[in-house]
Image (cartoon, rainbow, N blue to C red):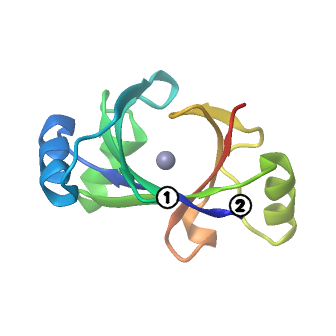
Amino acid sequence: MKKIEHIGIAVKDLDAGNEVYKRLLGKSHYKIEEVKSENVKTSFFKVGPNKIELLEATDPSSPIAKFIEKRGEGIHHIAYAVKDIRKEMKRLEREGFILLNKEPKRGADNKLVCFVHPKTANGVLVELCQEIK
Ligand code: ZN
């Protein structure tokens, strides 16, 4: 793992969340992107070498809608940048982690991503992400 790439925060309302994080970080988001396969709309903020990703559900079936229903708004996942996502996935499986997808999938922000089940990572949903060149 290279570094923490971003921290994902589940929000009920992306516009309202963008306003809060603009005031908090002193700058606006640099992009908004919808990920149709996950039924989420995301916005990204840069904080030094890391990013904050806000996620809003676009459909009640979205994992974000379910998360907010169960736990309220808050930290949803921590994403780590990796060089070779398939290699990391194999390594984590060998280490006993449960991967939520068997193949890397296309995530927001031009990344291949894979999620690790929170029950095998001390209650935290982990995202691996590899930049698509
Ligand atoms: Zn993410």
- Helix, strand or loop at label 1? It is loop
Whole-percent x, y for residue 43 in the image: 33, 37
Q: Quarter of the image containing the N terminus?
A: bottom right
Whole-percent x, y for residue 9 in the image: 34, 54
- Viewer-nearest residue: 124 or 34: 34
C-alpha distance separating marks 2 and 1: 28 Å
Disc 1: CA contacts within 10 A as few (<14), some (14-19) or many (>=20): few
Q: Is residue 3 above or below residue 11?
A: below
- Helix, strand or loop at label 2? It is loop
Residue appearing at x 82%, y 72% in the figure: 95
Residue under numbered circle 1: 49
Q: Any mark on residue 120, and which?
A: none
Whole-percent x, y for residue 49 in the image: 49, 58
Residue appearing at x 39%, y 35% in the figure: 62
Residue under numbered circle 2: 98
Which numbered disc, 2 or 1, marks the residue closer to the eye?
Answer: 1
Q: Is residue 106 above or below residue 65?
A: above
In the rendered view, does 132 fall on the left or right side of 87? left
The first of marks 2 and 1 along the sequence is: 1
Amino acid beneath label 2: Ile
Residue most extreme to the bottom:
122
In the rendered view, does 101 fall on the left or right side of 25? right
Q: Is residue 3 above or below residue 105?
A: below
Amino acid beneath label 1: Pro
Q: Ligand 1 near label 1 (Cβ, under 8 Å)?
A: no
In the rendered view, does 37 fall on the left or right side of 1? left
Disc 2: CA contacts within 10 A as few (<14), some (14-19) or many (>=20): some
In the rendered view, does 94 fall on the left or right side of 70? right
Residue appearing at x 31%, y 27% in the figure: 59
Query: How many numbered marks does the figure carry?
Result: 2
CB contact under 8 Å: marks 2 and 1: no
Whole-percent x, y for residue 73 in the image: 24, 56
